[in-house]
Image (cartoon, rainbow, N blue to C red):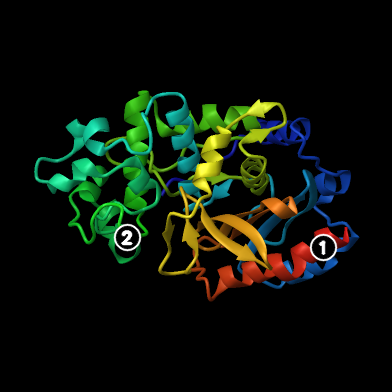
Amino acid sequence: MDRPVPDRRMVLAALAGAVAGGLAVPRAVRAAGQADGAFEEVAARAGALDQLHAMVVVHDGETRFARAFRGPNLERAVNVKSVSKSIVALLAGVAIDRGFISGTDATLGELIDDLIPADADPRVKDVTVADLLTMQAGLERTSGPNYGAWVGSANWLRFALTRPFVAEPGEAFQYSTGSYHILGVVLARTTERTLLSLAREWLGVPLGIDLPAWTRDPQGYYLGGNNMAMTPRAMALIGETVRLGGTFGDAAVIPPEWIEVSLRPRARSPFSGDEYGYGWFLTELAGERAVYARGYGGQMIYVLPDAALTVAITSDPTRPARTEGHVGDLHRLVVEAVLPAVTAG
């Protein structure tokens, strides 16, 4: 696994861009990462979760809380694991809007026919971009117990495309990083760019955030759906962009129509029970409509649009974080501490 090293100049630019774009960073937060008075309970509860590393809370466009409790500081880019899937889904929306891909119903046979192995099941050619975005390709998943064999293979794309079908395309949610890696290859091939350059140009530049290089497969394609790195503040900027319908300050970052269609329920996770759109989980927290990006270990971006709230959390990336475990603790932290704090403030 690559260990991306952040460029300090880009980190400072991210902070400057955040202020210029409307994400206010109060003096106390910039100086020491301290909370205002309403967040004493948030700080106490977050600090008691030994797996939680850092947390940024943005309410109504203002950073109300930002602190690193342990692990890397707030200015260091960290591996956000499968939060990467939500980022790749946003990039897919831009690619469609700019005409590189005709739409979510475009098939692999139309997009990367020359990369489909001759011994792949013929149904692979009929898998659509929507199937990949919702992880309903039907192919045996490459995550969980299959992940090691997949990333240990000589050709990650071939391995993913030659898995046996366990369901018909579009019929069942199969959590699989392989689906997002296929999508990443589609983005690279149709744009004739790398996934890294797309992420930097389409997200990094307008948001003023650094996106360091991350893992590539043996053929040189950047891993779609895992191992991207960004700072907690950058995660919050991504969340705010989603909350604001794809815009941030004066920048039109993601097409608003894509945000709207991405946050429609299209599948359901058998693990958490939450619904899934295009790269984002959908649920309710304390009766509030909520969407979230989730990465292994407890890397989270929460967006609660009606509460004007975005919460970014990084955690120990080496420890599991199940819905009934650490992620459940993080859900409760948002419900029982963060929401009351922003209401009181």
The structure residue drawn at horizontal position 27% and vertical position 37%, both measured from the top left corner, is 107
The amino acid beneath tag 2 is Ala
- Foreground mark, 2 or 1, reads 2
Q: How many marks?
A: 2
3D distance between C-alphas at marks 2 and 1: 39 Å
Instruction: Name the element at disc 2.
Output: loop
Which residue is label 1 attached to?
341
User: Which residue is most to the left?
Assistant: 119
Q: In this orientation, which residue lies closer to the viewer: 213 or 295?
A: 295
User: Which residue is most to the right?
Assistant: 37
Which residue is label 2 attached to?
172
Instruction: Name the element at disc 1.
Output: helix
Tag 1 or tag 2, which sits nearer the N-term?
2
Q: Which percent across, then down, holds residue 238?
A: 61, 42
Q: Which percent across, then down, holds residue 82?
A: 47, 53
The structure residue drawn at horizontal position 55% and vertical position 42%, both measured from the top left corner, is 260
The structure residue drawn at horizontal position 50% and vertical position 71%, both measured from the top left corner, is 322
The amino acid beneath tag 1 is Ala
Image position of 284 with respect to 158: above or below: below
Q: Which percent across, then down, holds residue 190?
A: 34, 27
Q: Is residue 257 visible?
A: yes
Q: Is residue 62 left or right of residue 125?
A: right
Dot 2: within a 10 Å radius of its alpha carbon, few (fewer than 14), some, or many (20 or more) residues? Answer: many
Q: In this orientation, which residue lies closer to the viewer: 206 or 305?
A: 305
